[in-house]
Amino acid sequence: MAEAFEIRRRTSLYLLLAIVCFVLAAGFGWLAFDRSDLILGAPAAGLVLIGLVHLLGLRDARTPLFVADDHGVRMRAREGWVGLLWSEMGEIKVERRAGIRHDPRVKVVSHDGTKFYTSPLGLATTVSPGEAEVQLARRRSAAAY
């Protein structure tokens, strides 16, 4: 039995972004205090909120976003976790970056084609699109039963 393929968050990136936000917020806060200008407090508050959002990404960093093994795939979805056996999937593919607005992702379509699920790839995750294509093709062909 092969080791499971997992897509996880890149925790170092989330931590770095949170730290940068907090440092910038402190700078804006100091500037607002030093100049007695309350308007400069607004960017400080906004950056603190953005930093907190990035810290929330660290909260469940140990939990993978996507897992593929010999039996099928499990992934995080809005309603919790979704699991599909290889025989229950109509299609699984890696979609590359499309323009500036659509990041790369793994797309899984149910056998009847009525539902699809996606999992992110790229800079914010530990897996590149090329690596995902190779790993998924290896597991899908090995589980073709």
Image (tube, grey):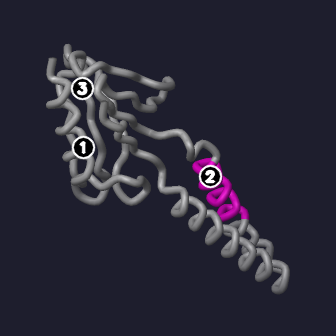
Q: Earlier in the sequence, mark 3 or mark 1?
A: 3
Tell me the quarter of the image containing the C terminus. Answer: top left
Under mark 1, the amino acid is: Gln
Near-viewer residue (98 or 33): 98
Residue 115 point in image, percent of width and height: 29, 21
Query: Relative to 117, does residue 30 appear above or below in the rendering?
Result: below
Under mark 3, the amino acid is: Val
Question: Which residue is the site of mark 2?
Answer: 53
Q: Which residues are magenta?
A: 45-58
Q: CA distance from mark 3 to mark 1?
A: 18 Å
Which residue is painted at 18% across and 30% down in the image? 142
Q: Secondary structure at mark 1?
A: helix
Mark 1: few, some, or many residues within 10 Å (few <14, many ≥20)?
some
Q: Name the mark on residue 135.
A: 1
Residue 40 point in image, percent of width and height: 73, 74
Query: Which is in the foreground here, disc 3 or disc 2?
Result: 3
Query: Relative to 66, does residue 84 appear above or below in the rendering?
Result: above
Residue 120 point in image, percent of width and height: 37, 45
Question: Which residue is the site of mark 3?
Answer: 109
Query: Which is in the foreground here, disc 3 or disc 1?
Result: 1
Main SS class of the magenta portion in the image: helix
Query: Relative to 122, does residue 28 appear above or below in the rendering?
Result: below
Which residue is painted at 72% across and 79% down in the image? 27
